[in-house]
Image (tube, rainbow, N blue to C red):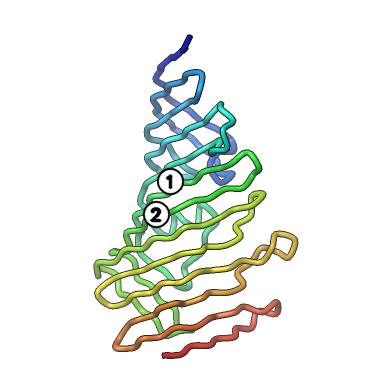
Amino acid sequence: IGVAAAAGITGFSQAQGLFGLPLGNGTLSLEVDTRQLSAWGNISLGEVPVEARWTERFVDDGGFRTRYEVSGIFDQTAMASLGLDLSANLSGAIGVGVSYAIFPDSRAIGAADLDLTAADINIPVIGLRKKGGTAARGALSFTVDAGALTDIPRFEITSEELVATGAIRFAAADQGGGLREIGLSRLAYGGNELFGTVVLADDGALDIRLGG
């Protein structure tokens, strides 16, 4: 016999929620049955207001155990509050939609869609610049193992000024987990059509190899 319940929750908070960040000021709808729990509504992720959906599955069928879906607007202040300092290469607000699924073996996969229209992107090391106010979109997928980001097997940025596609690899958690390599399968901007790699050495030196 199936058992189901529904409820509304106000003032929800959790000390450690999505990506280990605190959740607060939640106004959520909740549904639960013998197979899963679902909650959705408005909540603060750290200090950033977002729309969110949380699904917790109780069945062991090889699928995900927990899935978070979050969307919101993140400016530099918001990103800094989440521990992301991108000020050297990025200014302006980004529209973000993220789906993140955690499996019983602690492996996780995620995907993000980004509205980069308001963002100013500046990466001098490869001469890339995208001005704020120019329509642009981004998308990426990522994998996490035991809580550490391991790689971004696909990313894409598209606008009238540039197209960038490729992948990003990170060091293993026992090696610090930092950025190791950016592979560019295509980088097109300002009449340039490039491909190549950017490798970060342990001492911080960059090995940049571009062709086109």
- Badge 2 or badge 1: first in the primary sequence: 1
Residue 49 or 177: which is nearer the viewer?
A: 177
Q: Secondary structure at mark 1?
A: strand
The residue sitting at 46% across, 68% down in the picture is: 87
Residue 48: give its label: 1
The type of residue carrying mark 2 is: Phe
Residue 94 or 77: which is nearer the viewer?
A: 94
Q: Which residue carries the number 2 mark?
A: 74
Where is residue 85 shown, x and y percent of the image?
A: 52, 63
Compared to 81, does 40 lie above or below? Answer: above
Q: Secondary structure at mark 2?
A: strand
Say few, some or many: other residues with alpha carbon within 10 Å of mark 1 (under 14 / 14 to 19 / 20 or more): some
Where is residue 1 shown, x and y percent of the image?
A: 48, 9
State the quadrant of the C terminus.
Answer: bottom left
Callouts 2 and 1 close, C-beta under 8 Å: yes
The residue sitting at 49% across, 39% down in the picture is: 67
Say few, some or many: other residues with alpha carbon within 10 Å of mark 2 (under 14 / 14 to 19 / 20 or more): some
Compared to 57, does 186 lie above or below? Answer: below
